[in-house]
Image: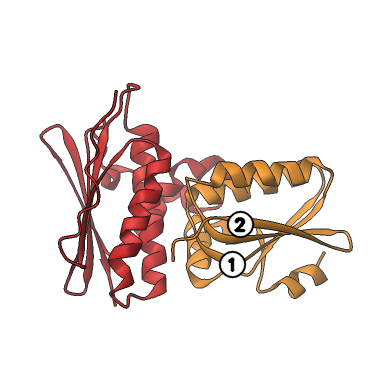
Chain colours: A orange, B red
Amino acid sequence: MLAAMQMTTDVSEEVTILSLDGDLNATNSRDVESYLSNIIDEGNRKLLINLDGLNYISSAGLRVMLMANKKLKNAEGELKLCGLNDTVKEVFEIAGFHMILNIYVNQEEALRDF
Amino acid sequence: MLIRKRHLEISNIEQMDLTIRNTISEITRVQEAFSALTSGLNTDEAIIRKSCIVIDEVLSNIISHGYEDEEVHKIRVRAEVKGSLLHFHFIDDGIQFNPLLIDDSSSGNGNPSHAGGLGIRLMKRLVDDIDYERRDHKNHLIIGIQLA
């Protein structure tokens, strides 16, 4: 199951879609944070992070999501997440992040709500 | 200073014993060894994912907060399947740290300012059994995860 992180970006109308595939953990969270920061710094204000291919997320990865949410809020932007598997969903719930982040079942549903 | 590493030893398919250095990149070695351990056990994917999170949280906490010097330290990780229980034993010579004494209640409310205890909270909520002992100037963290 062990998988290196792969990040791909796509654009749908005004929304930038970042898809994460693999594991988001202490080993690669800084790389993902830097990649996400660059996307926001480039002026993208509507960001959807698709976690459909994510095996698991640890607290290091959760902090990356917090950073992106804060950065976008400060820039009057919007962050949405979709595609959480059961483990990722459980982690979000334990952390209480399901109460502060906009989470959708799938990409289509999230895109409709931007 | 180079520390001689004790490489993965798998005496049979149901246990691993690995010693790593105190750098974040070493966590991957443990997860690779754990992946090898579980590959032949027909283990539920969700259990493997939870275990990988626990490995990440425990080791990143030891490596990031456990040492007051810049020296190379060794961390030993053992994992073993005993019946229906996946059993982890983490041993480190860092500062005394008992996660069972940490109040993580405020880190589950989604408040970004309380995100500091998130790793401990995740680790404690994802496992079925946890025990801690300080012995011979070392932290011994013993964790159990039910396989079914």
| Residue at numbered disc 1 | A53
| Residue at numbered disc 2 | A6
Residue B83 point in image, percent of width and height: 16, 74
Mark 2 or mark 1: which comes first in sequence? 2
Residue B78 point in image, percent of width and height: 21, 53
Q: Residue at x 37, y 33 (%)?
A: B65
Residue A22 point in image, percent of width and height: 54, 61
Q: Quadrant of residue B39?
A: bottom left
* Residue type at tag 1: Gly
Q: Residue at x 32, y 78 (%)?
A: B42
- Position of the N terminus of chain B by quadrant: top left
Q: Secondary structure at mark 1?
A: strand
Disc 2 from disc 1: Cα separation:
9 Å
Q: Residue at x 60, y 59 (%)?
A: A99
- Residue B120: tell me if it is visible: no
Residue A74 point in image, percent of width and height: 77, 41
- The answer for which chain carries disc 1 is A
Q: Nearer the viewer, residue B118 or B108?
A: B118
Q: Nearer the viewer, residue B46 or B4?
A: B4
Do dots 2 and 1 share one subunit? yes
Q: Are marks 2 and 1 in contact (CB under 8 Å)?
A: yes
- Position of the C terminus of chain B by quadrant: bottom left
Q: Nearer the viewer, residue A79 or B87?
A: B87
